[in-house]
Structure formats: structure tokens, C-alpha cells
Amino acid sequence: MADTQSSAPATSSTASRPSGMTHAFSVDVEDWFHILECDEAPDPAAWKKMESRVERSTTVLLDLLDKHHHTGTFFILGWVAEHHPDLVREIARRGHEIGSHSHLHGLVSAAKPADFARDLERSLKALRAASGSEIRCFRAPGFSIGPDQAWAFDVLADHGITLDSSLFLSARAHGGFPLDRLRPFDIVLPDGRRILEAPVVPLRLPKVSLPWAGGGYLRLLPKAALLGLMAQAEHAERPVVTYVHPREVDPAQPRMDLPLRRRFKYYVGLNTVIDKLDSLFAAHRFGTISDVATRGLKDPPLLVRRAS
């Protein structure tokens, strides 16, 4: 287990809303059947036999970004890059940032360091081959790097990753990393190497934390609520890291026979996402995670120490 040490928590600014603040738009590029921790999901050996919809769904998002002249970061499974290299090239051609989302969509919290390193290497090789460029960004499936997986940052740094967006700053289904931060910050490794972190910051209510800027909550919450939360973040000079999956703009996707609660979480609001994104893109400025994390205010660094 790795121990973590943090500096004093950051405080929200009370400055007036900045003009033209850029928020981060990110896409976890995986297909409709790439679902985590689900007995009903197909095994990786069967993925090639499944109907693939990732190209058409990702193109919907690319066209919407083009419409509003925004860019974003696309965290792509290495498996997707191997089977759909033209999609990776199209994402790059349109001016977007490309990162790794692992190769086989496994949780970091369920992996050993050596297995995680092998999977990362496979994804980076596939993404480099498809895009023709080095890959410097990473997001763990399910935001599954928690305090006990802080060893993963050493592996990421060993493989040239300089920007991460794997930390969900609250407890959640796949672990989470409870931490009092509001903006991007540096992760400082024991040997002094640094990885810039662009975390997902939930809305912290008295009894629950809502990851409102992505996934099921983005699909469930009314558009007016999403616009209001974006405005609040801008007033606090706090860039928002949004995240979606291609399947979330594909209401016609095949439905898996999931347990009722999981089915609701996975499929609720699919027919609302395009309209919500269109409104968010019209009202706010979005860019890549690198754009957001390397500009503007940063919170204090997180110092990571190896387990004794």
C-alpha cells in the first residue's frame, strides 16, 4: 500500500467570473460492450465478434466539437486502436489530443504493477502505431487509481506519461481518491518526477458526492442544472473536467441484459446527451485536458511516498 501526503488544502476563489475560461472535454473511447465489473459483459476474447459501434458514435462527438470549434482529449483503448486505427487517425486529424485508456479496459485497482505495466505498454504501442505520435496522457478505466494504487504513477512515469486524469476526488464504485483539491495539481513521485493531474471534482453535498460533469449524472441531470453548475465553477475559477463515452450518444445501441440498477445507471438519458452537450458547447469554451491543466491556477501538489 502506498502512503500519500498532501499539502494544505486549496480554497475556492471569490473572484468574479473570468472571461473565456476553458474547460476540459474528454472522451473515454470504448465500445458499447466495454463495461466494467459485469458478469453479463462479453469476455475480451469475444470482442471481435461483437457489433462495433465505436466509430459512428465517436464521429457524432467529433462533428459536435467541430460545430462549436472546440477540441478535446480522447482517451482510447489500445484494443480500439488496434481494430479501428482509422478512427484514431481521424481524431488526430481533427486536432484533438490522444491519450491511453489502457488496452483491455481493466481496473487498476484489480491489477498487479507488472500486469498494469504490460497492459499500458500494449496500449501505447497500438496508439503510437495508429496516430504516428507519442502518447503522454492517461486515464484509468473507471477512474480506478485510489490511494492504494499510487504505485501506478511510477509505472506511468516510466512509460513517458506526463499528464493523468485518473483521479476521482471522492469515494466511488471503483474506489476513488478522496482528496481536497479543486483544480489541476502536480503529483510528485519519491524520485522527484512529476505527473500533472487533471482530476474529476464532484459536487460535494452533505451526504453524497455527485460526479455531475460526466457519465450517468450528466445523462440524468436536467440541462439547466448542468449549465448552472458550469457557471458556478467558472465563478470560482475552477475548470471542469467533463467526460463522456461514445455509447452515450448512441440511443440505438444494443442493450445488455443487466441487473435493474445497473441497467438504469448504464442506459438512463441516452437520448438527452447530444442536446445537453450542444448547449454546454454553445455556452462555454472547451479544450483539451492539456490546455486546461497547463494554464491557469493550480492547487498544491500531492507528494507520493512509497509504502514502508
Image: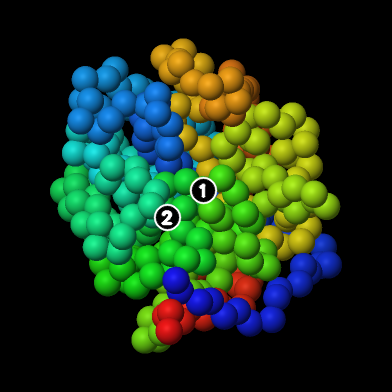
Position above or below: 135 against 254: below
Position of residue 258 measured from the top left corner of the image (x, y, whole percent): 49, 21
Q: Give left or right: position of 186 versus 125.
A: right
Q: Which quadrant holds residue 180?
A: bottom right
Pointers 1 and 2 in contact (C-beta within 8 Å): yes
User: Are there few (<14), some (14-19), or many (20+) residues within 10 Å of tag 1?
Assistant: some
- The label on residue 109 is 2
Q: Nearer the viewer, residue 108 or 64?
A: 108
Position of residue 241 measured from the top left corner of the image (x, y, whole percent): 58, 52
Q: Which quadrant holds residue 260?
A: top right
Point 46% across, 16% down: residue? 257
Q: Give left or right: position of 80 versus 299.
A: left
Q: Give left or right: position of 113 versus 231.
A: left
Position of residue 124 measured from the top left corner of the image (x, y, whole percent): 23, 54
Mark 2 residue type: Ser
Point 40% across, 28% down: residue? 39
User: Which residue is tagged 1?
Assistant: 174
Mark 1 residue type: His
Distance from disc 1 to disc 2, alpha carbons, whole Å, reads 8 Å
Q: Which quadrant holds residue 191?
A: bottom left
